[in-house]
Image: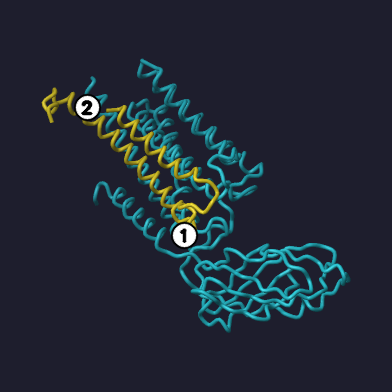
Amino acid sequence: MKRRLALCAALFLTCVTCGFTQGEQQDFLRSMGKIYVVVAVLAVIFFILIAYLVYLDRKITKLENSIFNGREEQS
Amino acid sequence: MIKDWWKILAVVILLYVLLMGFLVPLKPGIINVMPDSITAGDTVTLSVEGYNTHFNRSTEEIRAWLKLDERHAILAAKIEASGEGQVLSVTFYVPATLPKPKQVQETALIIDSPVDGSFVMPGAVFLKPNLSSAQADNAPWTRDQITGLHQVETFRYPYRNILYETIRNTYFHIPMWFGMILLFLASAYKSIRYLQRRREEDDLYAAALATSGLMFGILGIITGGIWAMYTWGEFWSFDVKQNVAAISLLIYMAYFVLRASFEDPDRKATLSAAYNIFAFVMLIPLLFVIPRMTDSLHPGSGGNPAMGGEDLDNTMRLVFYPAVIGWTLLGLWIAQLRFRYIRLRNACEE
């Protein structure tokens, strides 16, 4: 599961960097007064915060499982 | 009193910041002027491309100047709007003589309209001297005074060339660094408390605050890179402020390496608390002293390391300071969750 998470993060970062490397010409992020640069910045903040929440959530689940002696392992 | 009022406050403030950050428009400005070089003595028509402008409204009252310096300017002879208010054709009869007849000089283009107010593009056009009439003459340049500029009071963010709409990143990129410093400060405080009282909770809280501060720092570096990509041209240009930011993040990463390398909980807590205080002390020369001593691409060169004085006007302050509070509270919230989790885990292991 950790591997899958890392894969998702890597995929996301690749997508983002692909968007960046389009060069100097009038690309999508430069259109409309570069407003999509702000959108990209917010997207990065959002995804990293969510990724951290997911990470914390998984650790708490593990802790719960160990406390309740595997009672909720099936679910 | 609701126990977690500050979490609600964080959400409300961040909602306000998001709404204001995206919905408030920019002031009008000039994107481009063609041609960008003219010769003294010519009659030139400049094609001006505006941003958020309304040149098609009350066009006859629009005035434009080419400004050489504080005392020398010429008024446009003819002004025509075309398109949907974004394009303006401005005709100047440029005098053959110049105050400084031998130099190529930069001129600023000033446009004044009753609808949009007045705005300027510095260094818009290069003015080349006319070599056949090379004597100094001020007279044609002092006839037209720049007076009676319109001030339009609107709630709008400043227009800056190159930045354009990305000026809104002020509410998302800069508060990451403010938040990081505040979280590291709180972390250092908790470490000092640990060394005073020797209570394990203080050390755990210091670690949780440092985690959340480090996350804000990483966010700050990534968002700064994205912003730089579209304004400076490169994600990472080895600018002094980028480098010291990266170094300070590495110092805090070492804090977690240090924490992970001890088995004995008391030694781990004591040594990492001492290191944490040292790390925060290291931040001060890195983030507040070195950037002031060198040139940088980043705004605020030679002065405040974060911002240029004119980039944050009173309109932006109304959103920027709440943004700092909101993001910092969010960071505290994340740190608190992390602390509660670690404390629960430790309690279970015992």
Name the residue type under label 1.
Met
Q: Position of residue B68 (x, y in %)?
A: 74, 68
Q: What is the letter of the yellow chain?
A: A
Q: Name the residue under label 2.
A: A63
Q: Mark 2 lies on which chain?
A: A
Q: Which chain is cyan?
A: B
Q: Identify the residue shown where x is 78% and y is 65%.
A: B128
- Residue that label 1 marks: A32
Q: In the image shown, does B158 or B322 lie closer to the viewer?
A: B158
Residue B301 or residue B209, whichever sits in front: B301
Position of residue B156 relative to residue A62, above or below, is below
Q: Position of residue B127 (x, y in %)?
A: 75, 66
- Name the amino acid, label 2: Leu
Residue B103 makes an appearance in the image:
yes
Left or right relative to B340: residue B252: right
Question: Total label count?
Answer: 2
Q: Which residue is drawn at 67% across and 78% down?
A: B76
Mark number, residue B71: none
For mark 2, give the secondary structure: helix
